[in-house]
Image: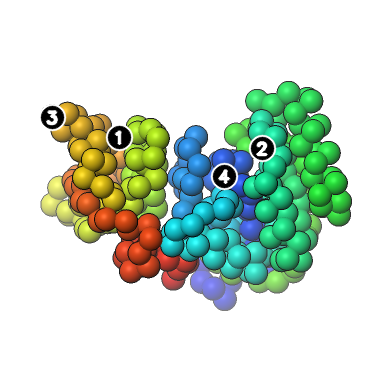
Amino acid sequence: MIPPTEWPIGRTGHIAIVGRPNTGKSTFLNTVLGCHLAPVSAKPQTTRRRLLGIWSQPGLQGLFLDTPGLFEGDTELDRAMEQGIRRSLEDADVVLCLADPLRESGAEDRRVAGFLRDAAKPVLVGINKSDLATPAQVAAASAWWAETLPDAPRFVFSAVERKTLDVVLDALAKRLPEGPFLYDPETLTDAFERDIGADLIRETVLEELRDEVPHAVAVEIEAWKEDDAANRRVVRAVLHVERPGQKAILIGHGGEMIKVLTNRSREKLETLCGMKVKLDLYVRVTADWRRKRDALKTFGLAGARRGG
């Protein structure tokens, strides 16, 4: 690690990544960083709290704030996620708004645009998923955002293809202020490893289960410790659900589903930790936890920034 007194000076600042659900915000961050830091799935609301990803290059340190997808919700969890988005916009020096051309622009995009106008920060619009969208879809999305945010430059790319991101990354970097780096250039995030682990477990739940059940799941890490004798990490996590029926689905017939979730989550945690992991998953009913502020605080979802 480099001592803080020796950290470089260059373009340094915060870049908020915003957009409606499933525009590819977390995928964009993971591709830029070159690692699977943020949870990703095809389901909305995969991201529930903002995550700092630190992108350091010679003379440049971009502090990306990955945020939840913005949508209209009525639970305490929804309000906490919206609060996190607002705080990220307040902290940002520049904003990257991601758009999904595969879906017609509508109310959620208009709400995002309203947030961006209120924030009054420099905005770049990224038309993502160019590898999947037709030229007509890309053109329609670009035209909608040109009319909605006429002062925001637009870029077309695929967040899964690193080479397509160079132009937008260069444009973001040019809009950052000059100053000393805020983190060691070797650092990727300020999030605790156990918090990233919790998100990866929930990512597995989203991948394996359907409908509303995954969105009723919160992951609480009860133990995250070293077993030096066995050279492994020992993790105990609880999957909180809101209804007994959801618990039955997570466990599965004869315990088959919880075995699948445990095995797949263990593989991700071993990649994260760089060592063998002993993972024990339990399921617990915490009725209506999404509507309870105290429960959100317990699960680290009450708007608190990870890592501090």
User: Does residue 273 appear in this view?
Assistant: no
Disc sitting over residue 100 in the figure: 2
Give the labeled residue for mark 1. 264
Query: Where's the C terminus, which quadrant?
Result: bottom left
Q: Mark 4 belongs to which amino acid?
A: Pro
Give the labeled residue for mark 3. 254
Q: Is residue 92 left or right of residue 144?
A: left
Q: Mark 2 belongs to which amino acid?
A: Asp
**Residue under the image location 20 percent in, 51 percent down:** 284
Q: CB of mark 2 within 8 Å of CB of mark 3?
A: no
Q: Position of residue 81 (x, y in %)?
A: 50, 59
Q: Position of residue 24 (x, y in %)?
A: 59, 41
Q: Nearer the viewer, mark 1 or mark 4?
A: 4
Q: Is residue 208 above or below residue 185?
A: above
Q: Earlier in the sequence, mark 2 or mark 3?
A: 2
Q: Position of residue 217 (x, y in %)?
A: 33, 48
